[in-house]
Image: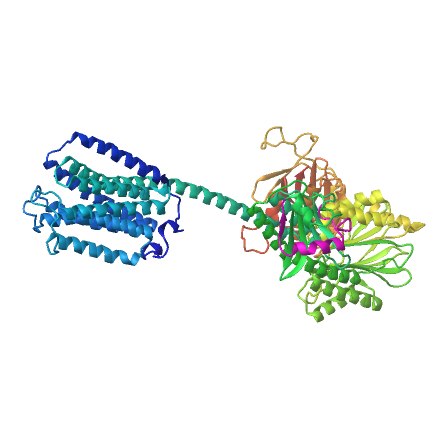
Amino acid sequence: MAAREVAEPAAVPWEMDPRRPRPERRLDLYAAVAIGALASLAYGAALSFDIVPPRGLSVVFFAAAPISAAFAVVVIGMRWRAEVDPALSWVSAGLAVGWFAMVLQLVSFPAVLPGGGPLGTSDQASAALYLLFHLAFVGGALAGAIGAPGSWRVPALVLGVAVAVLLAVDLVPLPVLLRRDTTFTPILLATEYVMVAFTAVVAVVWVRRAGRSATTLRTWVGVALSLALYDVLLNAFAAERFSAVWWASLSFRVATYAVLAVGAVYSVLTRLAETESYTQSELDRREAELRTSLGLTRELLGCAQDLAKAVTPTEVADALCRDAVTASGLRRAVLLVSRDHADTVVLGRVGHGSSPAAETSGTGWDAPYVSSLAPLARQPLFLETPEEVRARVPAGTPLQEAASLAVLPIRVAGERLATLVVWDTVPHRLSASEREVLAGQASQGGQALRRALAFENEANAAATLQRSLLSPTLSPREDLAMAARYLPGEAGLRVGGDWYDCVPIDGHKVALVVGDVMGKGLRAAAVMGQMRTAVRSLASADPSPAAVLRGLDRLHSMLEVDEIATVAYVLLDAETGIARVARAGHLPPILVDDEGRTLLLEDGGSPPLGTPNPQRLEAEVVVPPGGVLILYTDGIVEDRATGLDGLESFVELVGATARRKRGDVEALATELLVATSANQRQDDIALLVARVPMRAGTAEREGADVLGSRPEPVTAPDHPALQAEVARSLTPEVGLSRPSGTRQGLTSGARPSLPTEVVRSLDGALHVGRVPSYAAAPYAASFPDGPEAASAVRRWIRQSSRGLDRLLREDTVLLATELVTNAVRHGRGEVAVRLWPGPDVVRVEVSDANPHRPEPGGYDLDAEDGRGLLIVGALSSRWGTAPLPGGAGKTVWFELDC
């Protein structure tokens, strides 16, 4: 740290220094000094025995003192730097000068080096060095105690060393301190007594400045000062060398620096222990802080996620109140918002009677009360006792029962949007972290609430626009029952491009229209409005479906829009029941008779609007009396799970619902939306239901025949080869039976209960069919050679196989479509189709006038065709081919086990 590299401030006493990063163990300095005094007295009592050790032992004592002092200098020097302690730095400096003087005295001692040593130090100079190292240690302690400037320390250290050197080389004129017999002169005695007094004063100053409870190292310095006092006192009392008292003085000298050395070591060890304990406690504290911080982050992140999911102001308020209760531990919360249509409303409420996400006004949360609460909510307010709550909250409000309360303003850019009130009926003291979480949630709630309010305003404007673009009235005739539903998508502005309309043409004709402009939002709604207006104008000029679609094509091109638009248009004659249908890329309408039988009106289809040079087709169908026409958009049959595959289920649902409702178009429309979970769909939904009135006479019977009778077998086609094939199907043949458990060795015999037909396939293998070709087909039909044959076959098979399982029926339709497509593409003339719809097996035969057997294509992923027979082989239970008699054509068949 930088504080350790520069001199410490000189004007601040060390005991007042606030820079202590860690706690340190402290000792009772008074007790330590008292113990030292008692030990010294006990030692003095032992002097009465007048024990005089050998002179040679004095060398050991003389050497022990500087060794201990050197060790103490190093340790104390490190400690003051580590703790940035000016007092210890002065002690270390004085001790260093004393140690240097002791070393010089040691090398001049006669028992060590006779003749004054290498420097020729005299006895007078040796006595002066003795006085110098005592004075240096005590003077350093005094400088530290009184807070001497640190800048003086180095000059004082240099001066002390220089004086010691000058004394050792006898360059300083000294008075006579020792006699020839080494006894002390009065000058030396007086000087030592002065030193005793000076040391006593310094010891008192040190002890008082350090105080009774001092750190370990400072306590040991105080004890060392007291021992130095005893050393000088006994040395003066002895007045001669090598007496018992002098030896006691020498032992105190060793003890002085030994105490410092031992105290320094003890201080380091205790400091290490304290540092380890402190480090562990700091780690624990930091871990607790980290856990708290993570908890705060988790709470705020959870609140942010909840607010991000909220779209409306009510949802924002509900999420904010719920998260505030969870984070604070308080059990009740309410969000108060000022609204245009009411003074104050409660958007969110948790734990206070009303269900969450309810928008209510009044009930105590009225404008006067909120006005009285407003001054409290200028800044976050936390009241944690019932007395504080009663002192700040007006009486007669829902908060009069609160015992702890938090009021937080919801602001954005300085504007207060709402007030979040969280409270409990029991006292609860919020921690600092809980307060931080509540403040953070209030800040997050402000942004979310502002976004939700803006979205609500935009959504309301969009909904108003949507309602204005949809037809307010439907039926132009009293006997034509109609119902319409529009449901916006689940997400976004809840406005889109789906639309419906009913356009009166003349006295008995109406145009039923449903359209879909792909996309959502105001752009799609604007295009939709233009399309709806154009349909009304075009229908008034020429109501025929194809003409209207051609006009919409021109409009789509003029608008130069990127959105794809689809339309289903039905021109219905309510008196005759004749409906002319045209579709531009739209899903086919559904026709339901009075008994609930359904038919998809797939004819009259063409590409979506805006397609270059489209051929607009239309078809005609007779709606039976009491029949219902249903036009819809893809949102009701399409979702992420099923795609458009939901159409088949929707048709079945329409039939079942129509049977229950029996002509109630309003109930039919409502139940269709409920049954399809329309309110959970992502896309918009438009639904138009129209019921043709009942008619008397033959018209009713004719209409009933449209859906009521099952298809009858048709006569043989005009092509001679196909006539022969149909005739062959009506005459018995000699079949081949298969012995049980074998595939080879086929022999002729009696027909089994499930006769089989064996046909050699393209690759030469034997394909065995369970339905013989001589069995008469329950359903047979011929279809013209053209691109519309495939769709006609699909309708015919669906209509003829209603008793089959839905998946099995769709597999049959798929495979039959592939065979018919091949027959139209590669054959000649009409295509004959025969169907056996179960109950054990479904068989379909497709015959054409081309005698060449089909060749399966390879597995070329880039090829545009050639996969039809691969699909047939993969999905069917069996399949094969058979030539027509006389080479007039061929039959390709497949079977599916039920």
Q: Which residue is most to the left?
A: 115
Taking depth in this image into account, of 159 and 370 the one nearest to the observer is 159
**Residue at (69%, 46%) from the top-left corner?**
390
Quadrant of the image containing the N terminus: bottom left
Residue 74 visible? The answer is no
In the displayed structure, 19 sits above or below 761; it is below
Q: Which residue is most to the right?
A: 697
Quadrant of the image containing the C terminus: top right
In this picture, residue 129 sits left or right of residue 37 = left
In this picture, residue 138 sits left or right of residue 454 = left
In the displayed structure, 150 sits above or below 882; it is below
Q: Which residue is most to the front?
A: 186
Residue 675 is one of the magenta-drawn residues = no
Residue 387: x and y in percent read: 66, 44
> How many marks are shown on the rendered structure?
0
Taking depth in this image into account, of 35 and 433 the one nearest to the observer is 35
Taking depth in this image into account, of 298 and 530 the one nearest to the observer is 298
**Residue at (59%, 31%) from the top-left corner?**
745
In the displayed structure, 608 sits above or below 439; it is below
- The residues colored magenta run 356-384
Residue 358 visible? The answer is yes
**Residue at (94%, 50%) from the top-left corner?**
696
Residue 59: x and y in percent read: 12, 39
Residue 379 is one of the magenta-drawn residues = yes
